[in-house]
Amino acid sequence: MTAAGGPPRLHISADGRATVTLARPRHHNRLHREDLLALQKQLAAVAADPALRLLVLTAQGTSFCAGFHLGELGQGDGAADPQLFERTVDALEALPLPTLARLNGSVYGGATDLALACDFRVGVQGMELRMPAARLGLHYYPSGLRRYVTRLGLGAAKRLFLLAGPVGGGELLRMGYLDELVEPDALDERVEALAAALLAGAPLAVKGMKASLDEIARGDFDLPRLRQREAACAASDDLREGLAAFGERRAPRFSGR
């Protein structure tokens, strides 16, 4: 890694948490092609590890992310792989475990969709979001538009894409882009509280319901598939442990089986 930063870093904790940190603070954590390729490998590794139960996405410095490095747009390998950014964000959304974006600062361009692909977002007072695609002459990629509409509604999506102006943290909270908005010095505490709540759930139930809720939101759910997840949880060791722990007034010890 150079003084200007480098690709995202992946850290695995003993409690089943994976943390991906964007690491180009000097350039507001803009995403280069090599960063997207690194992210894809890291997300694939997280998806393949059954011991992991949560992903936290965050960044160094005072900004979360400035989006794709526009200097690489339409040049070199990037021109030959125009869906690289879209596939990377889609891979984040498709992770089977819950995801939490720790937004330590403002978010711009494609990074707005990167954060939106997470299940939860905690932002800080003073942050802003701007989606400048219309001011650049870009038509945004289809899965990103779908995420905006299904998660925020058509009106909010049109406001963010077509007006292309900056939107502050308070309005992001009101429109549902943020789940929580806190002072910067309270960010770690709130992220830790949400992480603890997600890690406390039964893995089969959390992962199964995440998948089912996302499928319902996209309109592509299959009722027999949802019933299979329901039945798997009903027959699981986790359910028996959860009921026993409830009766004994103790914290459950889930195994993910």
Image (spheres, rainbow, N blue to C red):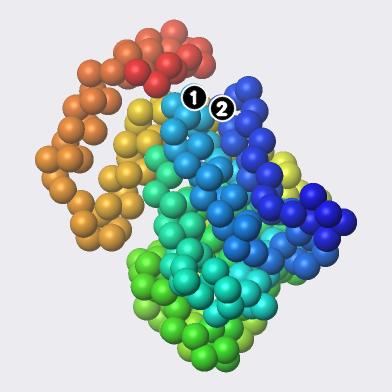
Q: Which amino acid does label 2 sit on?
A: Gly
Q: Relative to 237, say whether 170 is above or below.
A: below
Q: Quadrant of residue 196?
A: top right
User: At 57% across and 58% down in the image, what residue appears?
Assistant: 36
Image location of residue 169, percent across then percent down: 65, 69
Specify few, some or many for label 1: CA neighbours under 10 Å numbering under 14, 14-19, or 20 or more: some
Please give the residue where the numbered disc 2 appears in the rendered image. 16
Q: Relative to 51, say whether 244 is above or below.
A: above
**First in sequence: mark 2 or mark 1?**
2
User: At 36% across and 43% down in the image, what residue appears?
Assistant: 210
Whether residue 193 sits left or right of residue 116 in the image: it is right
Please give the residue where the numbered disc 1 appears in the rendered image. 51
Image location of residue 144, percent across then percent down: 43, 69
* Quadrant (top left, top right, bottom left, bottom right) of the C terminus: top left
**Which secondary structure lies at badge 1?**
loop
Image location of residue 212, percent across then percent down: 28, 45
Residues under labels 2 and 1: Cα distance? 6 Å
Whether residue 147 sits left or right of residue 26 in the image: it is left
Q: In which quarter of the image is residue 135?
A: bottom right
Whether residue 41 sits left or right of residue 91 in the image: it is right
Q: Which amino acid does label 1 sit on?
A: Ala
Residue 105 in sight here: no
